[in-house]
Every structure is written in structure tokens, then in C-alpha cells.
Image (cartoon, coloured by chain):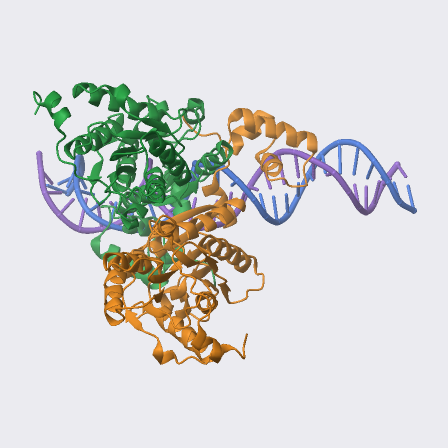
Chain colours: A orange, B green, C blue, D purple
Amino acid sequence: MGRRPTIIDVARLAGVSKSTAARALTDSPDVNEATREKVRKAAHTAGYERNHLAVGMRSGRSGLFGLVIPDITNPFWAEVARGAQDIVGENGASLLVFSSDWDHDREAAHLRALRQARVEGAIINPVSDNVDDFGRFGVPFVLIGSSAERFPDTPSIGSDIAQAVRLGLDHLVLLGHPTPALILGPKSRLARARFLRTVHEHCLERDVDPGALLVEDSDYTFEGGYAAMQRLLARRPIGHIAVFCANDLIALGAMLAAREAGRECPRDVSILGFDGVPAGAFSWPGLTTIEKPAREMGRRAAMALFDEIAGRPQDGRIYLPCRLVERGSLADLGAQTPLRVAGVGRS
Amino acid sequence: MGRRPTIIDVARLAGVSKSTAARALTDSPDVNEATREKVRKAAHTAGYERNHLAVGMRSGRSGLFGLVIPDITNPFWAEVARGAQDIVGENGASLLVFSSDWDHDREAAHLRALRQARVEGAIINPVSDNVDDFGRFGVPFVLIGSSAERFPDTPSIGSDIAQAVRLGLDHLVLLGHPTPALILGPKSRLARARFLRTVHEHCLERDVDPGALLVEDSDYTFEGGYAAMQRLLARRPIGHIAVFCANDLIALGAMLAAREAGRECPRDVSILGFDGVPAGAFSWPGLTTIEKPAREMGRRAAMALFDEIAGRPQDGRIYLPCRLVERGSLADLGAQTPLRVAGVGRS
DNA sequence: AAAACTTCCGGTAACGTTCCCAGTAGATGC
DNA sequence: GCATCTACTGGGAACGTTACCGGAAGTTTT
């Protein structure tokens, strides 16, 4: 009684064999249209719902996909998850979501769970440095996020940090901040090197000495940004100071430090963030920032995964462009005279 | 070659029958410890990984659970998801996560997907008013969130709004704001009525006329809070004004409106939020708010689900207490003289 | 020493689905 | 009128696992 109806029940109800019932329900062309309708009706009245476990067993396609991210609670990763969810859903499949907390053991356990669930594919932000873990993974996958760079041979999705940094710098220069200070992440992070390298290149192209830029180290937290900004303000006690922060949390912390030091944003300091976290929209002033296309990254990762599974050609690592979102944390100083002389040949 | 090893491969490798191999791997007591070890070793060298689809088919337990929430991108629901994820994971199962976008059709499609995946149970924030949808759902489930109140007969988890409102009001009174203004959600929402009722009760207990409170309607957005606060400021152009907002987004919007009107928070206005969104920590001043125990709600929902499935006794609707988190958006006016007279008999 | 019991193992069926093969009936070709 | 073809249908096997049953040893009881 409590038993869920199977295709055999449907077949019996429709007066056909289970093979025919299956064919009718899978839109196979080899079935009479009248019978199909009869079966459909029977399936409906019986309240039949195809058992995906059985389908998966028989066909090898479980209709399940996996997503392993550091923390679903982090707004960036939540957006990624949403993007992946949407694409996976559009393809009639479902998404298993796991949070690794940047922990190797948790990650390993999640990957095992994915294998056991016989997911058809997975999207992973790797915490592990060990390529072998994924070589042996045994499931098609794509990597996502900047840490994926450690695996150059694997298809992966990331944001285009170089483009993003140039975008920010261009905007800063346009507003009259040709030599912004930098608050970067920890030296251990790969993203830091890339950020810094792009800044250097950009400076050299503008005939600006990169060594002239003030640089502070920080971790990627609000508190870290707060402390770094205090150091920066001490180094430059007077005059307007523009700061390009490696992420939005740092930027928000920097903003608070400035205010508490009596240097008002954007009057006395200009602050540019990087990430596009929602909190930046609610700060005062609103945080101008470079927004990573988080949801689109999730979407594209899922699409790349489907491509890979279908055997369609892959294009290795995909870098998605970032977007400048202007709010109120940048002052427009106008073009600055001394630097304009140096840059005049270019513009 | 690319075939995943099955338990038959393991059995062959270990020189036993597949029944014995299965027994050894499922920690059944009916197997010699030496054989078990032999099988374990064989399983390891073969790289065997139990096929959960097959297990699910045979045993009826898929190891899958479902979560249907409005939007994983919403920090509140992300926390809920994380809590559910943790408990489900601790029980060796995996979680399928869906976003309904408050859309009936999407919700229905997700519920269908859950049935087809043969999830063992589901946690749902219902957008549908229709109890029948869930009566026919055919899968054990618990509801979560305030909208679950429409289904009094179903086990559900929510936050204790009455307790939360009292907590906020007590704190406001303590700080010298005995008659705070209210910015509420739309009249259609159930949560609004509950909020308002509790405020009334609290007022009557303090011999305060509830009719004396300023009330503004809004939707649950930043912009809505901004507009409502403008109306409020127009009605009370001078003097300190305290506002209890129905959610944090409203509160953040109200804060901006006040600042733009030249009324500084917390000097000229006191603003109390409700929800505990992360953005509240980064605003200026930091938003004092009532935090809903989002992650704990997710955890408890999952635990209640396991209880239900195991046939353990259920205790119907569970209301989890909220917590006051003090940041800087409330002024301490001290106890206010006229009201202290009225309330002296109580304290 | 036979009986009863314990311990361990192998064979088989079943879960629900899809795929392959064979088969039937009617239509078409010569 | 027989062969061939088309359109559709039914039967059975298989996917990988666990539950059940029966049996072969060895151990204890009477």
C-alpha cells in the first residue's frame, strides 16, 4: 500500500508489457501514439514517478552532479553554487552540494561521497595541492576558482584577475589616482603575485615607477584590512590617499580604519575593493569594487562539465571578465597635473 | 578497463563469494575477522567504492536528502543549508540543494526531482500554500521558516519571533526608548502580524499605549526601508527617534535615509534590525540586530528529519530562540523619566 | 557418540529500470 | 500468393547490491 508504484504497475494498469510502458515514458519513437497516451494516463493515475536510482543503475547515468566548495555560507561561493544549480537543473539533473572548509580531510570525504553516489560529474574548488587526488578521482570534473591554477592541465573556470586589476587601475587613473596604495593578501597566495605583477605592468606602461606605490600586507579579513589601513595612514598622514584592496572585506575594514582616524571616505581617502560582496552595497559610502562574475562562473563551470561529459571539445582554462561597479568610495580628483605630463603621449 | 570495480571483482580478488565480500564490507558480525581483513585489503587494492545507487535500490535507502529553499544566495538560507549539510553529512548521507525563487512551479519541479531521486527525506521552506502538495509528497519531510506556520500539523522549525521581538523591545526600553517606531513588512505577510501582536502585548505589560507608536509599512528591501524611514523622519522632524525594523535590509536602508537627512545614527536616531545578515556587521555604525539562529535551524531541521524517519517521537513545531547582537546603532539615552514613573511598580 | 548448537560461507532472488532480441500483424512489392 | 518490409510489442537479461536460506564445518551439551 505504501509502496511506490513501479513501471510494472503502470504497465499492468495500461494493459501493456513493462517494455512498452518504459518505451512510452521515455519518448522512444518505437511506440504507437495511442498506446503512449494510454500509458501516460496510467502513469498519471497511478502516481508513477520514475526511480532514478534504478535508471542510474541500468544506464550508468545517475542524474546527479556534485559541487565541492569551501563554504556555502560565503556569498561568493553561494553565487557560484546558484549558477551551477541553475544549469544542472536545466539539464534535468540535481546537484549535491558540499562545503570543504578548506580542509583536506573533509574534501577527501566529499570526493568519496561523490564517487559513491555515482555522480556524473563534479565541480570542485580544490583545497588539495595534490594533483593525484583528482587524477584518481574517476569522475569527470572541472575546477573552479583561483586555486585551480595549480592544475594547468585540467579544464577550469576562473575570473580574469589581470583584466580586473587593469580595469581598477584604469578607473583609478581616470579619477586622478595614478599611484594608488595597495593592500594585498598574504604572500603565500598565488592570487597576490598575479595581482602585483599586473599592477607593475600597468605602471610601466604608464611610465610610473611601481616602486613608488605604497604596499601593505594583510589577510583577507575585515580586521586585516582595518590594521593594514592604519599602517597606511600612519605612513601618509596628510593628503588624499587612494587604496586598491585585494578584496572587499579588506576594503570595508580599511574604510572603517580611515573613518576612525578622522579621514573621511571619499573626501580624504578613496577605496576600491575587489570581489563584489553584497555587504559592499550597504556600507557608507557604498563600496566601489571590481565584481567577480560569481554566478556566471558557476554556470560556465557546469556548462564546461556537460561539454566534457558529452565529449565536446574543451578549451582548457576559461577566464571570465570582471566588472567595475561604481558606488561612492572613490573621489574624482580630476586629472592630476604632474602625472599628466608623463602620460600625455599615450592619451 | 575504465569500468569501476564492483563487489564481485573484490570477491574474486579476495577469493570469496560476493555474499561474504558484502558481509565483510558492511561490518556484519557473521564473518571471520581474518576474512574480513582479506576482503578489506582486496577492496582497497581494487579501488572499490560502494555503489550507492545499487545499495539504494536494494535497501530502499538512497543516502540522499533534499533541501528546498528560496535562494541559496540569500545569506540566511545559505546558513540554513550549511547547518543541514553538516548534520546530513555526519550521518553519512548527502544533500541535494534546490532554490525555488519563491516560485510555485519551480518548487513543484524540485519536489518531483526529490521524489525521483528517491531521497530519504527533505527539508522544505514552502512557498506553496497548498497543504495537499505536501500531503501527496510521499517523502518524509520537515518544514522550515516562518511560512511553515501555515501547516500546523507538520513538524517544522522556525525562529521564535515573539521571543525575538520581546528581546529587542526589552533592550530598547533599557536604553531609554520606551516607544520605538516600527518599520514593518507588507500587510500580507504572516510574520508582520506576529511581530505587531507581540509589540502590542509588550506595550500593554508596560502600561504603554500601543497606539502611540509610529508605524510605517515597507517591503523587506533596502529601498523599502529607505523610503519608510524618510516618511518617519518627516513625521518626527526633531528629537531622537528609535526604530525597530522588521529586517536588517530595512534597517540598513533606514540608516542611509537618516544619514542623508542629516540625522546621524546613533546620535539622532537609533536603529534596531532583525535577522543578523553579515552586511550589518560592516555598516557604519555597525547594526545592532536580533540574530536568527539560521545555522542551528538547519541543523535542527535535519535532526528532526532523522528523528521522524527513525520513528522517534516528534515534538511538532520547534521555535528556536534568537539572540541580540549589539553593535553601534543604538543610543543609550538612559532611563527616561516620564516612563520610569509608569513602570516603577514593575522594576 | 549422537544431538544440538555456533560460526562461517556460498548460492540465489530481488530491488526497478532499460536494452536487446525475437516475434506478430499488417502493409507493400513482385 | 508468397516474400519482404515496416511498425509495433513482449520476454528476458543485466546493472550492483543486500537479504534470505541452506549447508559445512567445528564446538558444546547430553
Taking depth in this image into account, of B222 and B74 the one nearest to the observer is B222
Where's residue B306, x and y in %? 28, 35
Compared with residue C4, is residue A137 higher up or lower down, i.e. above or below?
A: below
| Quadrant hosting residue B154 | top left
Question: Looking at the image, which residue is at 53% across and 55% down?
Answer: A303
| Quadrant hosting residue B216 | top left
Question: In the visual, does A55 lie left or right of B323?
Answer: right
Compared with residue B305, is residue A251 higher up or lower down, i.e. above or below?
A: below
Q: How many marks?
A: 0
Where's residue B158, x and y in %? 29, 31
Question: Looking at the image, which residue is at 45% across and 56% down?
Answer: A326
Residue A187 seen anywhere in this rendered image of the structure: no
Where's residue A213, x and y in %? 35, 75
Q: Quadrant of the C terminus of chain B?
A: top left
Residue A222 seen anywhere in this rendered image of the structure: yes
Taking depth in this image into account, of A137 and A315 the one nearest to the observer is A315
Compared with residue D6, is residue B315 higher up or lower down, i.e. above or below?
A: above
Question: Looking at the image, which residue is at 27% across and 38% down?
Answer: B271
Where's residue B237, x and y in %? 32, 33
Question: Looking at the image, which residue is at 52% across and 58% down?
Answer: A304
Q: Going by the picture, which residue comes out furthest to the front?
A: B238
Taking depth in this image into account, of B176 and A57 the one nearest to the observer is B176
Compared with residue A260, is residue C15 higher up or lower down, i.e. above or below?
A: above
Taking depth in this image into account, of B112 and A1 the one nearest to the observer is B112
